Image (cartoon, rainbow, N blue to C red):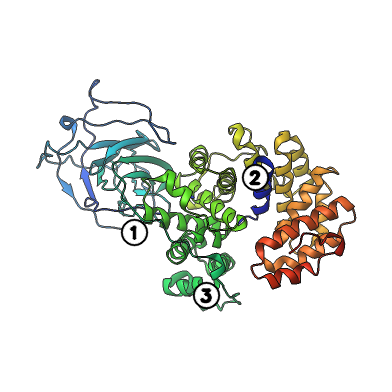
Amino acid sequence: MGKLLAVVVLAALVGAGLLGCGGHGDAKAQEVVAGRLPPPVPAGDETVGPSQNSPFGGDERQIPPSQVPAVSTATVSPTQVGGMSEAPVVVETAVVTSVRPEAEAPAVEIVYGYGVFVPSRVNIEVGQEVVFFNESGKDFWPASAIHPTHQIYPELDARSPVKSGQSWIFKFDEPGYWRYHDHLAPQNTGLVVVQGQPTVRDRPEVPGREDLSFEEPGALSVQDAVNLFKDDGLLERYILKYGPANVVKLLADYESRIGGDCHQRAHVMGRIAYQYFGSLAFSLSGHECHSGGYHGATEAFFRDRGTGSLSSDIALVCGDELNQFFRHQCVHGVGHGLMAWTSYELHDALELCDLLESLGDRLSCYSGVFMENVVGGLSASMGHVTEYLSDDPHFPCSVVAENYVSACYFYQTSRMVQVFGGDFRKVAEACSEAPATAHLVCFQSMGRDVGGFTRGNPEGAIQKCSYAKEGDDRLNCLEGAVQDSFWDVAGADLALEFCSLLQDTDEKARCYRVIVGRAGQIFQAPSELSDFCARVDESYRSGCG
């Protein structure tokens, strides 16, 4: 999952000493209302103000009962979308046939036009309706996060395009923070905050990581690969037998060969994984398929728990039962999902991470957010669009609040590699230009990317790290590279070879210290750890086991 684990753990150690998907309740039948917008709300009849008690910004507006349009309705059957209409669609004005009872809470109006929802945020009460008016001049399709599967609040989904000049009504029966988007232009998003008493739910049961054991999958036949993308039952069996991390790798490996949609299928995988493994689904998955596994697990978690108690649920999702290694992976995965859930609003996702109590958890969550910004945000073809990437190798680290800067550089070198076309000499130069407080994490991040570029070739990794200035910068690069090689027990041989190739005494000592510490976290059986320690150079074996 991005191989950022020890980088974050060590940063937490230095800095301090050492979270889809909740749609519940009965939704109002999905309807389309024909007709144009009602007259603007007269001054004095609307309330506009900043959001309160939420990490999300925006404004809010309510329509008085007198301004709620009474119109005839027509149910729209789901249809296959063939593309967006570029020209405005002319519709007939509806005939008034009913009046909304005065006793009901007034409906809230959201107008969609020019690629934005106005207002972008509304606060309502449980049971209140929202009318989505389409004034965009083309079809639109309101739906719940996370695109493209809409599983956080699946009832919040028009399930077919709404024509320009028409509208869609939805009744929100569940309290929480409900993000939505235009399915046909998913970068356009909004937020409905439903205020009310949250549904009480038990804490999700977290199985013990030590109780889980998975087989290694072999090569798939073409037919098996095709079935893995189409048959949910087969996907479920693979998850239970081989584990989520191996399954998402298979999806990534075979996507281009059979023409499957890896990202969307990984969403399904993440939801199934959450069903069986609870919050461990975050640490058991991987970042392949543009983090779709994380997104799916986040969808399942919010559907299971709702979003009415974010501050407590995010803190609980990874439990207290995991060791530091696996806890980081879990919280890092939640960070990926939060970035997608907030529709790639970087600052919103980071502020959700701030709800976590411990510094280590916040750093792990930040790292997932920043990694998703690069890995997921580049995938505009899937509707995952970020405004926080540019050709500036230091952006967005240069614009986030100071307390996020170091965490930003935990993954920023992966963006630098893209900007510089794989030239690690330039990456090293850019890390040298980073704020002094971010040098350590930037060069460790560079080392992780070096490891990814030189997989199975420790000599090549060592050579690329030589672009970093001798001393702490180079030591940190080497540390990141060897950690990348020793992500699980299968990497033990490569990690040992890496350390043995180093000639400088300080570099060799740092290398062995890192892999000895990693071994204690990865090897679950004492006998396996002892066997590893016996292979460590005797001069650096102290503390192993």
Q: Residue at x 49, y 53 (%)?
A: 382
Mark on residue 80? 1
Q: What residue is shown with label 3?
A: 241
Quadrant in the picture for the N terminus: bottom right
Which secondary structure lies at badge 1?
Answer: loop
- Up/down of 76 relative to 435, above or below: below
Q: Position of residue 365 (x, y in %)?
A: 55, 47
Q: Nearer the viewer, mark 2 or mark 1?
A: 2
- Left or right of 510? Residue 162 is left
Q: What residue is shown with label 2?
A: 12
Residue type, label 3: Lys
Q: Residue at x 79, y 62 (%)?
A: 457
Residue type, label 2: Ala
Q: Which of the marked residues, 1 or 3, is nearer the chain's N terminus?
A: 1
Q: Which of the marked residues, 2 or 1, is nearer the chain's N terminus?
A: 2
Q: Position of residue 226 (x, y in %)?
A: 49, 73
Whether the residues at callouts 3 and 2 have beta carbons within 8 Å, the answer is: no
Q: CA distance from mark 2 to mark 1?
A: 49 Å
Q: Position of residue 35 (x, y in %)?
A: 20, 39
Q: Residue at x 66, y 42 (%)?
A: 409
Crowding near the residue tagged with mark 3, few <14, some 14–19, many ≥20 C-alpha atoms within 10 Å: some
Which secondary structure lies at badge 2?
Answer: helix
- Up/down of 449 relative to 419, above or below: below
